[in-house]
Amino acid sequence: MPQLAPHIFDILYQKGVEHAFGIPGDFALTLFDALADSKIAPIVMTHEPCVGFAADAYSRMRGLGLAVVTYSVGGLNMVNAVAGAYAEKSPLVILSGGPGVREQKEHDLLHHKVKTFDTQRRVYEEVTLYATKLTDPKTADAKIHHALDYATTFKRPVYLEIPRDLVYAEITESEHLPPPIKRTDPDTLTEAIAETLEMLKRSHSPVILACVEVHRFGLQEQLLALAEKLGVPVCSTMLGKSVFPERHPQYIGIYNGEAGDLNVQKIVEESDCVLMLGVFMTDINLGMFTAHLNPGFTVYATSERLAIKHHEYPNVRFEDYITTLLDSPDLPHWDSSGIYTMKPRVTPSVGKISMSGLLYELNQFIDSNTLLVTDVGDALFAADDIQTQQGTSFLCPAFYASMGFGVPGVIGAQLADPSRRAIALVGDGAFHMTGMELLTAQRLRLNPIVIVINNGSFASLQAMGHQEAAFVQIPTMDYAQLANVLGGHGFVIHTSTQLQQALQTAQNSKTFSILDVHLSPDDVSPALQRLSALFTKSLKG
Amino acid sequence: MPQLAPHIFDILYQKGVEHAFGIPGDFALTLFDALADSKIAPIVMTHEPCVGFAADAYSRMRGLGLAVVTYSVGGLNMVNAVAGAYAEKSPLVILSGGPGVREQKEHDLLHHKVKTFDTQRRVYEEVTLYATKLTDPKTADAKIHHALDYATTFKRPVYLEIPRDLVYAEITESEHLPPPIKRTDPDTLTEAIAETLEMLKRSHSPVILACVEVHRFGLQEQLLALAEKLGVPVCSTMLGKSVFPERHPQYIGIYNGEAGDLNVQKIVEESDCVLMLGVFMTDINLGMFTAHLNPGFTVYATSERLAIKHHEYPNVRFEDYITTLLDSPDLPHWDSSGIYTMKPRVTPSVGKISMSGLLYELNQFIDSNTLLVTDVGDALFAADDIQTQQGTSFLCPAFYASMGFGVPGVIGAQLADPSRRAIALVGDGAFHMTGMELLTAQRLRLNPIVIVINNGSFASLQAMGHQEAAFVQIPTMDYAQLANVLGGHGFVIHTSTQLQQALQTAQNSKTFSILDVHLSPDDVSPALQRLSALFTKSLKG
């Protein structure tokens, strides 16, 4: 009979999980013993918020990821990162150690306890799709499969707590696994495809708006094929950036309502058939509610909901809808050439580096092998004007928008795909939160290039009418010198030339690099300039 | 009519809160505007876990503290620190910004949202005594007073969420404030005091076991007076360390069951009357369940429960019980001289510094003006053999035991009492989590002395039978050099002489200092050696 924790690690390894991010603790010691004996490599990090972000990034890249933490002081220190994974649909499995079943009965005041022995599970219920304690060897196997089905069907985190006295408990394997949570009904699918084709054929100005779920379900190639068959213009949201090759002739840019490129807004909002594929309907994604999408002209397909105009087709899995549509024999075709193509609003800096010049150089530097992670703040808004290449991987927490994702995120992403050249674009405030994790990059011999936007402020808050507020000023330090202390390579950047040289040197470095880019606090990206105006308006309005 | 947030800040300022720890965010921008305009100084930190720890430490020192955070990405990143404040009884008020009432109605997918607009409040229900959203200007005042009554009566955290469109809403002040949550019934108190005196008078070997609530309620002087009137031996738990002067002739040491000083264990467990004042009944506090306290010989008084032998006296406030007992005219008196006095098991190092030598030097260095904060891990266990002076302040997270408390804790504590010379004893693993916060110490011109136990491992996990496990090894760095990068003073310590010199130099430094003390991974404190044996036994048993 298999043993509980080894069984979980076996299943996860078979599903492509080769690394587990975590920090041990006394309630997770045996769980870490089992992990160390499994085929999955334990990646011990410095702080649980980083564990969560790294595992989230890994999940986004691999389709499944794993965080292993100890009870309360571990698990409760990762709630924010897991909330972000939930909000942005990242299929992350959380395994937490816990007090032994016997201890829970005998001792009421075990250390790390908050209110009850259920506190942590109850907290995790609020930020995962499924949260349970594996206290019974008879039901454990079914619960594990149920959890993984949830995680992979809806791309959301799930939580399993393992009492420390059951880590090696012998469990009964389920004879009949629970049925899939969501199955496609073939008749419903056929009807939905027929109506989609009908709508497309009548359309004069169709457009595809692609978002993050296309990436989560690994349907980028299907999207590309579908777009090319249809010949329609394609845009993406910020959260879905790079899901479609940004230098493809059909690509028109990021749709972000009034906050984004107004040409893209016009094409989308004047379309009589918007194919919204895997789109998150959110404020940041949709230009702070300046988006005007008429549901009467949309097909809305996600893992949770398929709707055409105002009616819904239940029981259709997102991936089945996309692949069946792609394989339809009678897809119409348009010629979208010349309509519009993405135009980054950046110019090279002469002399002193500017935000625009930084983005310009990045656009020159990024290639098809780049893995780019942006943190939150102007690092995120700036991405509006970064043009990725076909094949570039791009990750950002564009909806939940938690600062601190960048450094641990790039570590997790680089482990998920070591063949890529990893870059993180991080604000100084976000770097203060999780930059220490570069110590782990050094230990793992990872070599991400971390670009720190050093402007001594929470620039995106400052841009929201708070230019003078003392509480948006933040302390600074010599980030290049810090790189040396942590075992990496540091570069002080004041000019474009220094930036170009640093990027070239860092490119070939075997250790991580910090590029300390000195910018003025009021030098923000074009997207942030527009967004801040909209924010201020929405607050007043 | 007063305005919502300014009103809260006014009340808190009147109750002694002069600093608010926090990080702004878009949903908390107006809340920070109101804070900046109040009499309370905003202390902007680098990361929310640190916000929570610093505010917790401040609350422990001042009797009330304040953390101000933004929605989700702020609040959910502080859950662990707040859970620690709950578990260890720290009266911390959390103010969170939130989506505007109108926004919540109109827009379903506002950024930072997880499941529902109630997610964060529900999470906080699990880690606070009272968690509510102030969405109605008519009921807000009563809720605020209710929350503060909870916080100060039971010394636990409370949570108030303020929609960003109500920060300056005019509110109706309650004509009749809600009645106190717990009032002392005079007759019950009289009866309890009479029985206590009766029990004391019949006792042959009374002893006082004092713990953390004596500190939280500011009853140290009353405890001292009571102990001296009675003349009985006094011990404390680890969580209550320094609540009674450790060089007082009646002080016998830390009671920690078999894990602590066995002389103390014998005196307590053979006593026929143990006055347990403000004691937490926990595993770490009570020697991993090796404590054998017979309830038939105890008086158990806390803010939540007053019990003599096996029966309870409801409706008696802890502070009323202590002060009334102290003022009783017919207190008996014993002569405990010569019974036992605390004996730290430390010896000076000759040449290379050892853990024992480090503790020896610390005992020499600590004076009545010291503020000592210990982090978790061997930094905490080591405190068993640190002997504080009368007047020394000592803080540690001995029950919840979350790593990372040390650096932000000493910042919060030093702001709470700037007249003291602040020292933090921190393991390297804990330092990796929150050490970056020294950037804030530098900005605030605080000068804590941070002693880093540099042994390249999670030593307390290693001591639990995991000497060889790779996952308890952690990376190291040049902490002294890091001090320089962050704007402080760094010292590399290999010998006792270097330690003595560094302590003297750091003592007079106006910036913070890091003392990078190089120890071998297997050189752990005597307390940890004993505890790890008990841990291993409890796991096997």
Image: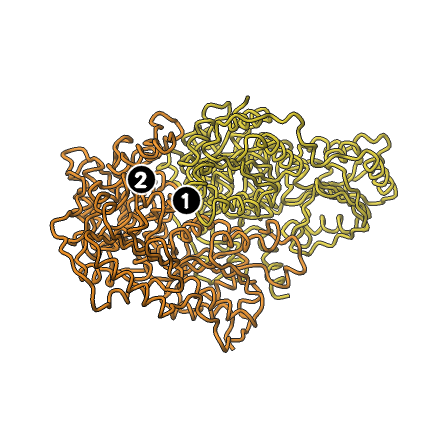
Chain colours: A orange, B yellow
Q: Nearer the viewer, residue A541 or A367?
A: A541
Mark 2, residue position: A290
Q: Position of residue B355 (x, y in %)?
A: 53, 48
Q: Which chain is indicated by disc 2?
A: A
Element type at mark 2: loop
Q: Quadrant of the C terminus of chain A?
A: top left
Q: Amino acid under label 1? A: His
Percent x, y for residue B475?
39, 52
Q: Which mark is residue B112?
A: 1
Q: Does residue B292 appear left or right of residue A87 in this picture?
A: right
Q: Is residue B393 visible?
A: yes
The answer for which chain carries disc 1 is B
- The residue mark sitting in front, 1 or 2, is 2
Query: Crowding near pointer 2: few (<14 within 10 Å), some, many (20+)?
Result: some
Asked whether, in this view, residue A45 is left or right of residue A350, the answer is: right
Residue type (three-letter) at the residue carrying disc 2: Thr
Q: Residue at x 51, y 54 (%)?
A: A125
Q: In the drawing, does residue B457 fall left or right of residue B219?
A: left
> Hey, which residue is sitting farthest left in the picture?
A338
Image height of B263 relative to B161, above or below:
below
Between residues B34 and A274, which one lies in front from this camera angle?
A274
x and y percent of residue B349 in the render? 52, 45
The answer to whether B34 is drawn above or below residue A88 in the figure is above
